Image (tube, rainbow, N blue to C red):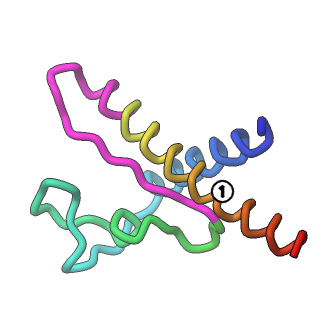
Amino acid sequence: MSKITNVAMAVVVILGFSACSSNPAKVADCVFPNSKELAPDWVCTGSADGIEVSAVGAAEKSATGLDFARQMAATSARVQLAQRLKVQVSNKVKQYAG
């Protein structure tokens, strides 16, 4: 289980760095959650080119501060990653056992 956690954390970090380092292409019908501001395609699709498993987390700004919102968004992305990995592993086990 620790290896899966490490892989999930690595994916989140890679997505974070790749999102900050490039000029994302904007899609007309893709907007940030609870906003009218245009967002890059990976925000809406939850996937990035060349990365097998990825997730996007979002959190609303609140009185608790920006750091708390970032932590909540990261937690949301980790939960999505864990769910996707669980499904993939479950399918592989069924495939192997069946």
Prevailing secondary structure of the magenta residues? loop
- Viewer-nearest residue: 44 or 96: 96
Residue 17 location in percent, x, y?
53, 49
Reading the image, the residue beneath label 1 is 85
Q: Is residue 11 left or right of residue 73?
A: right
Residue 88 location in percent, x, y?
69, 64
- Residue that appears at 50% across and 52% down: 80
- Quadrant containing the C terminus is bottom right
Residue 68 location in percent, x, y?
32, 25
Q: Is residue 98 left or right of residue 21?
A: right
Q: Magenta region: which residues?
A: 53-70
- Residue that appears at 45% across and 39% down: 74
- Residue that appears at 66% across and 45% down: 10
- Viewer-nearest residue: 35 or 38: 35
- Viewer-nearest residue: 46 or 2: 2
Q: Is the residue 36 above or below the residue 26 in the image?
A: above
The 10 Å Cα crowd at callout 1, few under 14, some 14 to 19, many 20 or more, is some
- Residue that appears at 59% across and 59% down: 84
